[in-house]
Image: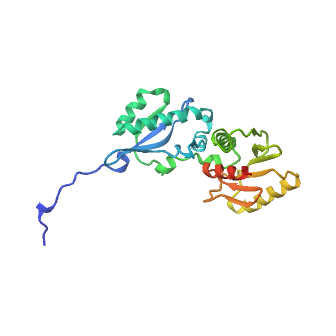
Amino acid sequence: MQSDPSAIVARPSRPPASKRIWLIWYEPSMPGAMRAIGAVWRGERRLHWASPLQRHFEGIFDPLPFMLRFPDAQPELSHFEAAIEWLDAVCFGASDPAEIQRACASEPSWRLHCLRYEGPRRGADLTSVLGPPASLFGRFAEPVRAAVLEAIEHLARAHPRLRGMPLESVHGASMEVARLHVTEGRRVRVIVHPQATRSECTDLALVADDHLRNQHRQGDRALLVLPRYRPRKLLQLTPRAAVVGLQFDMVARALLQLAAP
């Protein structure tokens, strides 16, 4: 039986997803280092925008995504944070990506660009376009060390339970990057293990615990950061040592727990 042609309602064709998405790009002060940081698109009723570089923990800006996404532009973190706040306000009042494009063009000092997403190239999907360079985790890269230190400094400056505690940065060949002085004679020592994997977490925590006891530092605690490890929750195998990955919220929770009375 043939269908009644009059029952067929013509529907306007929608453009492919790649034509409805616009990418937000950040251009650091050095030339040739522009990278995508987020996406903007128009929904049925309003404009949406999202970025993996716009994250907070209890109101504290997460510096890790920017520090890892732009390892050569880490000194520009404060400028980027201000640029993100400006962009967020612009997106809140806009209704179309073209408005964001015009706003970015009219305020070049923020070094933000809004460009239409043309679809994946060379097998790179949108997730990989917005992620950090994979080469950072192949060895003990100084940018990873600097990113962890910046995260600890952010927390020590802004979190009410940590504010006022002296923070000492550790330089040199040691894997230790910082020491948070909780009280006199009591510290949280932050250590980055660049190559360690999930299977080594338990051994590393036990080694750190034994090391602190052998040094007769009864008040010291160790926060072990493993860039290759992505745990779902904080891992604290001993009272003296906790293990986390490169997630700002977990670093924060571990630091607060180890610094607690």
Residue 129's x, y, as percent? 50, 46
Name of the residue lying farthest toward the front: 261
Q: Is residue 38 left or right of residue 220?
A: left
Whether residue 218 is situated above or below residue 170 in the rendered picture = below
How has the structure been colored for display? rainbow
Whether residue 216 is situated above or below residue 96 in the rendered picture:
below
Left-right relation of 55 to 19: right
- Identify the residue shown where x is 48% and y is 38%: 25
Q: Nearer the viewer, residue 15 or 152?
A: 152
Q: Position of residue 45 (x, y in %)?
A: 31, 47
Depicted 199 relative to depicted 41: above or below: below
Say whether residue 107 is left or right of residue 19.
Answer: right
Q: How many marks?
A: 0
The answer to whether any part of residue 202 appears in the image is: yes
Is 238 or 77 nearer to us in this picture? 238
The residue depicted at 69 percent of the width and 58 percent of the height is 197
Q: Residue at x 43, y 41 (%)?
A: 23
User: 45 or 187, which lies in front?
Assistant: 187
Quadrant in which the N terminus is drawn: bottom left
- Whether residue 26 appears in this view of the structure is no
Horizontal side, residue 4 vs residue 168: left or right: left
Residue 232's quadrant in the figure? bottom right
* Residue 53 position in % (x across, y down): 53, 43
Q: Nearer the viewer, residue 171 or 16?
A: 171
